[in-house]
């Protein structure tokens, strides 16, 4: 893309405002970590790896905002800021993964002064962002081995450059296959209610000149049953130790229909999205967002739903691991049994036979 989804710029955290795409391209810069937390909650920035990088830069910013002269006071300010950032969104584990990584830097014994800590936090946030780009590319090319020339791929939500610092996860596999010269076609789920597919994935694929059709979410089953989908590629916001995958609402339905129709179903996610502390997917917190995201849909210029009704708006669901063919990570393709092989992927010891 022309710039990273999130970076450090002009003494602040700069993000592409994803709420405005594809109609407007704006890049606000935030100078207060509380505003960074709000931007995550309001989905200025969204997508699991992007949220992680936003939290990292947010905490580095909090370090610079703190007036503390000594390390102990700075530590207290950082803990307060980390708590605010941590609650910005509950499902994507990349958020707390990134904060924990920076807090480990903050307590490093070799740092003497508060300013040393501030500098180290900024360097770590920058490194986390750079690593995100590099490992996403690696993951994309790992996954491209699953894609053949002429494939039609079903995709949900947005998992491209906008969902990470750059490049992306599941859509990164599509980009890699395309770069390898494979002719691919993508069926892009609109992804109600926030339409990340229609707004963001369609925008990214169009920019790259990759063939695609936008489809209503409820058309996905039809395309699978009639043999028009060779594989499904989705991302993940948190993967439990047993391979259960939490991802954008609607992913579970796709997984079940894919299994019913013999369509391989792959989740593409960096190991920072794997939460080995949770035994299974029912333990993953599922964000329930404001019902107005569902109720305020407009059709032909007018509100669709009657006034005065209620709605439910879970933002994620869990696809049990039995529906997941494999999980593509930066360390290789993880196949069942996930309990054993995911742990190997996380600690970097995935063997050829478990791939
Ligand atoms: O609510 P969002 O837009 O943050 O949800 C994003 C997704 O569900 C993605 O599929 C997920 O973060 C993985 S892709 C990087």
Image: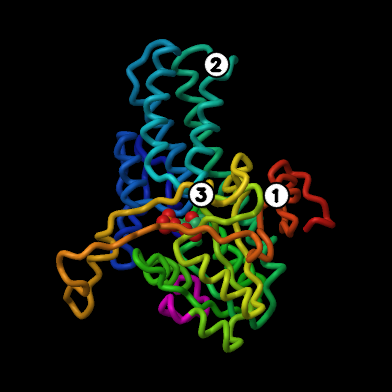
Q: Secondary structure at mark 2?
A: loop
Where residue 21 sits in the image (x, y, percent)? 33, 63
* N-terminal label among 1 and 3: 3
Quick one: quadrant of the C terminus? bottom right
- Nearest to N terminus: mark 2 or mark 1: 2
Q: Does residue 159 appear in this view?
A: yes
Question: Disc 1, disc 3: CB below 8 Å?
Answer: no
Name the quadrant containing residue 259: bottom right
**Would residue 77 be found to the left or right of residue 293 on screen?**
right
Q: Residue at x 34, y 67 (%)?
A: 22
Q: Which residue is mark 1?
A: 342
Residues shaded magenta: 206-219
Q: Which residue is mark 3?
A: 49
Q: Is mark 1 within 8 Å of ligand 1?
A: no
Drawn side of residue 190 relative to residue 234, left or right? left
- At horizontal 47% and vertical 31% (from top left) the residue drawn is 122
- Residue mark closest to the camera, 2 vs 3: 3
Q: Residue at x 61, y 65 (%)?
A: 173
SS of the residue under disc 1? helix
Pointer 2 with pointer 3, Cβ within 8 A: no
Spatial CA distance of label 1 from label 3 is 18 Å
> Which is in the foreground here, disc 2 or disc 1?
1
Name the residue rendered at 43%, 39% in the picture: 55
Determine whether 18 is above or below 216 in the image: above
* Residue furthest right as drawn: 353
The label shown at residue 111 is: 2
């Amino acid at each position: 893309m022309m710039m990273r989804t999130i970076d450090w710029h002009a003494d602040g955290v700069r993000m592409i405002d994803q709420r405005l795409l594809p109609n407007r391209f704006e890049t606000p810069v935030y100078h207060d970590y509380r505003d960074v937390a709000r931007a995550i909650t309001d989905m200025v920035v969204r997508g699991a790896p992007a949220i992680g990088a936003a939290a990292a830069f947010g905490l580095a910013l909090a370090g610079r905002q703190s007036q503390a002269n000594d390390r102990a006071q700075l530590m207290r300010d950082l803990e307060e800021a980390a708590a605010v950032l941590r609650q910005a969104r509950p499902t994507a584990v990349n958020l707390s993964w990134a904060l924990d990584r920076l807090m480990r830097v903050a307590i490093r014994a070799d740092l003497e002064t508060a300013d040393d800590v501030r500098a180290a936090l900024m360097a770590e946030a920058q490194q986390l962002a750079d690593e995100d780009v590099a490992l996403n590319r690696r993951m994309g090319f790992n996954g491209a081995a699953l894609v053949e020339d002429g494939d039609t791929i079903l995709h949900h939500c947005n998992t491209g450059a906008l969902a990470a610092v750059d490049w992306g996860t599941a859509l990164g596999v599509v980009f890699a296959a395309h770069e390898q010269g494979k002719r691919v076609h993508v069926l892009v789920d609109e992804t109600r209610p926030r339409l990340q597919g229609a707004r963001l994935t369609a925008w990214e694929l169009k920019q790259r000149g990759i063939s695609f059709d936008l489809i209503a979410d409820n058309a996905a089953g039809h395309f699978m049953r009639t043999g028009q989908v060779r594989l499904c590629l989705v991302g993940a916001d948190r993967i439990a130790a047993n391979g259960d995958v939490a991802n954008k609402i609607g992913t579970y339905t796709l997984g079940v229909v894919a299994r019913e129709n013999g369509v391989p179903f792959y989740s593409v996610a960096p190991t920072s999205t794997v939460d080995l502390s949770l035994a299974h997917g029912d333990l993953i917190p599922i964000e329930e967002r404001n019902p107005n995201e569902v109720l305020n849909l407009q059709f032909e210029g007018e509100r669709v739903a009657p006034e005065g009704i209620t709605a439910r708006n879970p933002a994620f669901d869990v696809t049990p691991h039995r529906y997941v063919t494999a999980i593509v990570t930066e360390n290789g393709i993880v196949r069942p049994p996930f309990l054993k092989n995911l742990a190997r992927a996380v600690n970097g010891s995935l063997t050829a036979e478990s791939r």
